[in-house]
Amino acid sequence: MSDGKANWSWLFIAALLPVLLMVVFDVILGHSFPEETFKRFANALLTSYVLAGILLTGNLFFYAGSRQRPLAPIVGMGIAILAGIAITVLLLSQDELLMEANGSVQAQILHNIVHMLVSAGAMALSATLVIGSMFAAIVSKKPTPLFDEEE
Amino acid sequence: MDSTLGAALLFWLPLLMVALGAWISSSMNNTTIGRSISFIGLAMVMISPWTIPSSDSTAVGQLLLNLLIPVIIMCWGLYGMVFGGHVPVQRLPPSSRWIGLAICITAITGLALMHWSIMTPMWRGEINPYWIVFWPTFLLFTISISSVACVSLLTLGTNRLDSALRLATLGLLTAGLTISAMLIDGAITSAEAFREHLWMASADILGIILGAGSAIIVFTIVIWTYENTQQHPSNTTPPSAEEYEHVAAVIADNIGGGEDE
């Protein structure tokens, strides 16, 4: 029986365990950790940081109307985004550190953006499928009345 | 037209229009204009393989076009599954649940056929480079979040074991597809290549979650710091005798009910 509280450790394990099992299965099949994986991870992290930062700053601007649009948080987020862009460019400029099969830093950045949109799209579609299926599973059962009718 | 300028005008600008349209429709309460901008942008991205064929990024437009039908029928199926159930509003006939389920299975089968049959999304005579990014990411993330959703139903809900088991079927189905793709060669992608892309998909998912999470943490710190610099609002003066009288009159008007009884 549930206690109605989120058990974060269980949720964390539930999120990671299937991925780990797939990776372990792959290792059992004799496949080793590809070197490019670290580059992909770092590129995805930096790109999603910058794009999510821009998205949040945009929302900050749109929703700040009732507070006379204070500039300080927007400037603060602008600096944080610029720092992200600077770190991305700096790391991409170091040969072989984060560069994938692209000829220039600019090409790699554009590739990262498109790659992230595809991955985020795949994640959004799977989230839609799972959330939709979850609602379908919940509403497939007749709701139980909260209180028994008085006889 | 210069290829760089062409890519900027016919691919990147429409891509920005999609984001801008979504922003306008969600933030400025002007949904019609926002959706129109997004739709035009999306349509231009989808036709970009023909409008600017020299750009490598247009493979994404081709992939979007290939995924359009499976995605639409998947959403349609989900709509039938949800609104064919015991919902209080806009309920569809109960048969919609089963029709919706069949449509969803058809959509997932369609995606699987893109891996194992000649329906694989192609681009410039080869496999679309973004399809082998999309497919493992979709499978892996579906397994992961369906597992989270099952645990959530069990820990947060009451008597939700049967719902959790139904949801677990989806996780097991996608896990089965993933293991099959790891063992059986696709029409164009070998099982070994798929396994390599599975590692990349894991790195992508982890990177995106950590990157977006970092941005949210930075955003929280910026807002928290700004709010801390604000002066505390001063206390208001206590109500005057006139204000007390006015409040008493309003209360007297709204309680009692002696005249009606």
Image: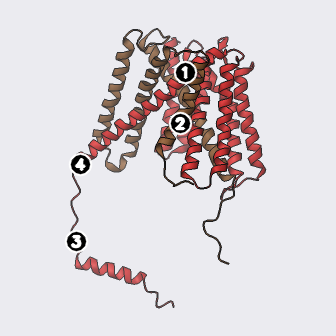
Looking at the rendered structure, which numbered label has been put on residue A15? 2
Crowdedness near tag 3: few (<14), some (14–19) or many (≥20) residues, C-alpha within 10 Å = few
Mark 4 is on which residue type?
Answer: Gln
Q: How far apart, in angstroms, are the residues tagged by discs 4 and 3?
A: 24 Å
Looking at the rendered structure, which numbered label has been put on residue B238? 3
In this view, the residue in front, B185 or B101, is: B185
For the residues labelled 4 and 2, say whether their Cβ atoms are less than 8 Å apart: no
Whichever of callouts 3 and 1 sits on the residue coming sooner in the sequence is 1
For the residues labelled 4 and 1, say whether their Cβ atoms are less than 8 Å apart: no
Crowdedness near tag 2: few (<14), some (14–19) or many (≥20) residues, C-alpha within 10 Å = many
Mark 3 is on which residue type?
Answer: Pro
Q: Give the residue number, with chain letter if any, for mark 1.
A: B199
Q: How far apart, in angstroms, are the residues tagged by discs 3 and 1?
A: 65 Å
Secondary structure state at the residue bearing disc 1: helix
Q: Is residue B45 visible to us here?
A: no
Q: Give the residue number, with chain letter if any, for mark 4.
A: B230
Chain in brown colour: A
Q: Do marks 4 and 2 share a chain?
A: no
Chain in red colour: B
Q: How far apart, in angstroms, are the residues tagged by discs 4 and 1?
A: 47 Å
In the image: residue B144, left or right of residue B172: left
Quarter-wise, where is residue B50 in the image? top right
Q: Which residue is drawn at 48% across and 11% down?
A: A102
Mark 2 is on which residue type?
Answer: Ala
Q: Mark 4 lies on which chain?
A: B
Q: Mark 2 lies on which chain?
A: A
Q: Do marks 3 and 2 share a chain?
A: no
Q: How far apart, in angstroms, are the residues tagged by discs 4 and 2?
A: 39 Å
In this view, the residue in front, A111 or B50, is: A111
For the residues labelled 2 and 1, say whether their Cβ atoms are less than 8 Å apart: no
In the image: residue A25, left or right of residue A77: right
Residue A116 x %, y %: 50, 25
